[in-house]
Image (cartoon, coloured by chain):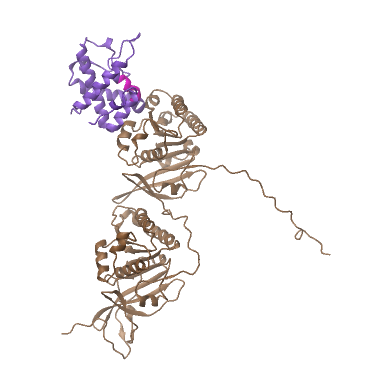
Amino acid sequence: MNRVNPKLRNFARHLIIHEAKILEPAGSHPPAAFPVVEKLRPHLAILMGRIGFRSLLARALALAGAEVPWLRNLHLKPDGMLPRVDELAAPVVPADRFEGQVVLVAQLLGLLVAFIGENLTFRLVAEALPKLPAGKKSFKL
Amino acid sequence: MKKKNALTKPRPAKVAAHRPARVTIRKLPTGVRGLDDILGGGIPEFSFNVIAAAPGCGKTTLAHQIVFANATVQKPALYFTVLGEPAIKMLRYQQQFNFFDESKLGHAIRFINLSDLVLEKDLDAVLAEIINQVTAVNPSIVVVDSFRTVMRKTLVSGRELETQTFIQGLTQFLTSWEATTFLVGEYGEDEMRGNPLFTIADGLFWLSQVPQRNSVVRKLQIMKLRGQESVPGLHTIRISADGLQAFSRTLGLGGKKPASARRRRRLSLGIPELDKMMGGGLIEGDSLLVAGPSGTGKSALGTQFIAEGLRRGEAAVMAIFEERPSGYIDRAECFGLDLRTPQTLGHLEILYLRPLDLSVDETMQEILSAITRVGAKRLVIDSLVGFEMALAPGFREDFRESLYRMIVALTGAGVTILSTVEVEDTFTALSFSHYAISFLTDDIIRLRYVEIDGQMRKVLVVIKMRGANHSKDIREYVITDKGVVVIGPRQTDYTGLTTGIPQRIGRVKEAAPEPKAKT
C-alpha cells in the first residue's frame, strides 16, 4: 500500500529544500545523504528508542525502494545509521538522489502519520526542524 | 477552714501548648472521575507511587490521565517508556481518549524511551539517564512505564542488591527533586511480599480484572497511601472514551451526615386517604417500600408520589427498570398528572436504566448524579427486582450492600425514597418480600389481591412506619382515572383478608366499588 500521496511528497520535498538551504558548509565530515532523516532521528529515538527508530526507518526504506531503484542498494548500518554520501555503493546523479530523499522522507512521514496521526507527526517535524517557517510546518493531508 | 487537698487545689491554668504547624501535603487531581474521592482528595504531592496490575487493566491509561491532568509547561511531566509498549504505540492508542491533549506533548509532557539503555547497560546507567533528564527538565511528575521491565534483568540474574540500590537511589532522587512519581508495572499479588518496591512506595494502586460468568469486572484497590485517608476496599472502574472512571464503594457519600433528629415534615403521597393511614403522610427522609404483585398499582403509587412532590415544588428522580419513560409519562397523563412539563423544565429526571453490563455502583452513580443535577427531594426506584435483574450477573452479589449504602446516605441527606418490589401473592401468608430487603426501609406498604364476592379486588395495609404510628386497617383501593384511590372505611366485616380468600363475618353487605358485570 502506498500511503504517500502527492501532498505528503511535496511536504517532504519542501523539508529537504529547506534543510539544504540552512545546512552548514561541509566540515571535516562528508554530508549526510539524508539530512532530514538525520534531523528527525534524535527526536524519534527519544520517543521510540534507537532500535525502534531503526525498525521504522528500515520499513520506510523498503517502501521507498519499491519506487526508487537505487534506494534498494542502501542498507542500514547496525546502529541504524544511513550511509553518508561518500559511502554510497554507486554514484547517484543529483536529480535521482534528490528524488530518493523525497520518497524516503515521505515514506517515513507516512508511517508516522499512520501510527500517531497528522497532528503529532507535524509536531515532531516542527520540533526536529525548528527553523521551518511557521506556515510550512504542516498541511492538510 | 477548709483544707485544700489535691482534688480541690486549683490547677494552674492550662498553657496553650505550642505545636508547630503540620506540613500541608498538597493533593494532585488524578483527572479520573471518582478517584480523587477514593484517594481522600487526590494524590499526595511528591509521593512515590506504584501502579500495579496484570496486562489490560488500564495501568498506562491511568498514568496518562494523571499526567495530562497535571502537566503544564511550567510543571512538566516526564514519561519514561521502557521495554513494554513503545511510546509511538502508546501515543497511537492514547490519543483516542478524550483526555489526550496533543498540545501538551513536547513542552508539558515529554516521552523518553529508555529501552536501549536497559538492553545494553545496567541499572546504574538507567538511573544516571533518569537523573540527567529530570535535572534538565525539572518535572513535577515522573512516570516509568513499565518499571517491571527495568528490573527484569536484575531479577532474572538474582542481583537483588542492585535492584534495591536502584530503587533506593531513584526514590531518594525523585523525592528530593520534588517530583510526584508513578512506577507502572505488571505485578501479581503474590509478588508483593518481600519486594522492596512495595515497601518503599508511598502509594500503591492495584488494578485488576475479575471475570464473573460472562462479565468482566474491573476493580481498583488503594492498597496503601501514606499521609491521608483513602477509601478502603475494591472499587469498580470502567474504561470508556473518557479514560478510566472510578466508582467508590461508598458512592462518594461517605462524608454525608445524616439529617439531625429534628422533627421532620410529612410528605403527601398524593393519595389523601393513604396519607391519613400513615399518620399524615410519609416522613421526609424515609425510605418506603411498596410491595405487591403485578398489576396492583405499585408504579401508579410511585407516579402519584412524584407528581405530588412536583406539585409542591420538590424536584424528583425516577429510576425505572421495567418500563420505558414514555409509558410512564402516558400513564401519568391518564391519571391527570403532568410529568412532561417538569421533565422539560429540569425538575424531573426519568432514568431508564437497562445497563446489562454495568456494575451496581455505576448504576447508582447515575442515580446520584441525576439527584444532584435536579436537586431532587423525592426518588422512586421502580423496581428493585428490575434493578437487580438489569445488572450483569457478576454484580448482583454486591447489589444489596450497595443499595443499602445508597439508601442510608440519601435518606440521611433528606431525600425521600419510594421503592417498589414485586412479590407473589400466596394464599397462605402475607409475605412482604422474598427479597430480604425490608431492612432497607423505614416504612412498608403491602398491596395484595383478595377474592371477594367473585371479584379480584385490591387491598393495602401499612405494615410498618419506623418511629411513627399508623393505621393498622386493611383498606380496599381501586385504580381509576385519578390513579390509586383508597376507598373510605367499609362497613362490611371480613376475616382472613391477608390470605387473599376472606370470609364475610359482618351482616352488612355493601356494593362493590367497581360494579360486577351483569349477565
Report if residue A39 lies within the magenta region. Answer: yes
In magenta stretch: residue A51: no
Magenta segment: A37-44
Image location (x, y in percent) of residue B143: 42, 34
How many numbered marks does the figure carry? 0
**Chain represented in brown:** B
Q: Nearer the viewer, residue A136 or A9?
A: A136
Q: Quadrant of residue B459?
A: bottom left
Q: Is residue B298 visible?
A: yes
Q: Indicate left or right for A90 with A47 as reference.
A: left
Of the pair A4 and B39, the residue shown nearer to us: A4
What is the residue that sits farthest to the right in this orientation? B1
Determine the main secondary structure of the stretch shown in magenta: helix
Residue B498, picture quadrant: bottom left
Chain that is coloured purple in the picture: A
Q: Is residue B200 left or right of residue A100?
A: right
**Is A119 on the left-hand or right-hand side of B173?**
left
Specify the quadrant that holds the N terminus of chain B.
Answer: bottom right
Residue farthest to the left?
A: B519
At 34% from the left and 70% from the top, the residue drawn is: B291
